[in-house]
Amino acid sequence: MRVRLLHASEAGTPSPQVAVTGQGRAARPSIGIGYRWSIDDWTRDNLGQFDVLEVTVDHCIYGGARQRAAIEDLVGRVRLTAHGVGLSIGTDVPPDLAYLDRVAEIVARLQAPAYSEHLAFTRVPGRDLANLLPLPRTTAVAKSIIAKVRTVQSRVPVPFLLENIANVFEWPDSALSEAEFLGLICGETGAGILLDVENLRVNAHNHGIDARAFLDALPAGSVKEVHVAGGVAWRGRGRDRPFLADSHSHPASAGALDLLEHALLRQTPAAIVLERDDRLDAVDEILGDVARIRARFAPPEMQVSRAAVA
Amino acid sequence: MPRLLERQTALLAYLTSPAAIFGNGRGRADARLAGVDRGRLHLEARFSHDKRMEKIRGVLPKTFALLGPRLGRVLRDFAAACPPTDIGRLHNARQFHDFLRRRWTRLSSRRPYLPDVAACELAMSEVRSFAEDEPAPPISTPSGSPGRIRRRPGVVLVRCRHDVRPVFEDSAARVARRQVFLAVAVPFGADRPAVAELAPPVFRLLAGLGAPHKRTALGGTAAAEALIDALTAEGLVELCP
């Protein structure tokens, strides 16, 4: 900070759009990353590496004018899909309609084929943890979420997708498995699933659930988009086993990609998006992950093998 | 079973409490959280707290560095006094600054100027954020034109009890105790905030110019006109149509 004295006396080539709903499913998924303002220049320099960029709608709502302009400048140059972190659909209050209307405007401006959010809550009136928290997985809670999903669908006129989260703890009255809970809500509303394979891997490790059984329990064709990320292991005091954290800070793990391969036996997502929120300067890692994902899940011959299992 | 919102409210109250963040899951928790693994809640609370503190540290790096060994205790007291109410980094940094302003002299007798350092860092971030959101168009209305003036949106006024320049200039000079009146703004044509020290009457004048005023209301003298021109050139005042 430099301080100057000022006293009174001194005053003198876009990728093809791919539908995410039932008809016209993607023959092979678009591969891309979550758009981050802090690496905007780098993203533009490497736009040819990505079929899709996932835009966080909250960055458009709460970010600066320059960030909004930069995002809108990408419309037509690359496929954009819309993701949210600010809805807190699980908070037991009516959805914020003004927020949803702003989301709808942004989705329209981005020409996004879908809008996704987390099946979670982050806040209650007067307190905001800014972290995704799980819901008790009961039919009563599912019913309240179903009503709110319908509200979202009535305000935002593109397919709505719900994402599975990485949860640190469980509610004791969770009677449904995560797959049953997601399946119930999505089945009733027609919402799709944004499958986060890293969240699934982390939950499998931390809670001892069977990740493949989770994937097998999801209705075939319900997964419309996929998130891939890499996190860290946390070794706290007195822990004999590390706790995995979904930190979006490191290269995607082989375990997460193996789960994605298993998921693709029954699912045909339109997009696979690499999420990175930390250590964004390690751009070689980002490009390396994208290349790995593309080589494994979107080579030209994929179209044939995927058609065979569909 | 209590309503879901009651359970969610109890959960967030617990997760943002020092008992959950620092207590390793020990201690009493709300009965509405019965059956939830306390160790896991401690982890959740700790992750969330650490994320929040990283946001604040990003805005107030010098303040955090100056807290030194007292950082742990200060963060614990802050968590107890100021639970998170908003996701934004500036909002959380402002909470921390306000907390230091209220409590610092009770927490430590050393570095009494720390709240002033936090105020300057916060002001710089607020100005940067404003400039990022609404780049100001250059204004080139000639001196003496009719019309009204106001403090330029995005200017932050800071009243300090110490001259904290040595902290920001990495100087070995001692921080002097004296009232300092500052205006932080991005000058026209510049791409980063600048800090100007103001004479107290100029500071008060700017503080009163939040809403548009007629130029002539400042007296209409040659000295007043010169002052308006100087403040305009510094990017602190703008001419309204």
Image (cartoon, coloured by chain):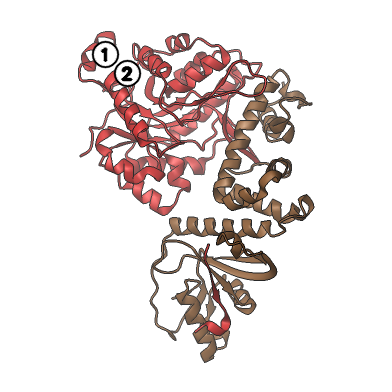
x and y, in percent, of residue A300 in the image: 20, 20
x and y, in percent, of residue A53 in the image: 34, 36
Please name the residue that numbered disc 1 is placed on.
Answer: A306
The disc numbered 1 marks a residue on which chain?
A
The correct choice, above or below, for B33 with respect to B144 in the image is above
The chain letter corresponding to red is: A
Q: Residue A156 appears in which quarter of the rendering?
A: top left
The extreme front residue here reads: B172
The chain letter corresponding to brown is: B
In which quadrant is the C terminus of chain A drawn?
top left
Q: Residue A19 appears in which quarter of the rendering?
A: top left
Q: Are marks 1 and 2 on the same chain?
A: yes
Number of disc labels = 2
The disc numbered 2 marks a residue on which chain?
A
The correct choice, above or below, for A240 with respect to B144 in the image is above
Q: Secondary structure at mark 1?
A: helix
Amino acid bearing label 1: Arg
User: Looking at the image, do the residues carrying marks 1 and 2 touch, with CB atoms under 8 Å apart?
Assistant: yes
Nearer the N terminus, badge 1 or badge 2?
A: 2
The numbered dot on residue B51 is none
Q: CA distance from mark 1 to mark 2?
A: 8 Å
The numbered dot on residue A268 is 2
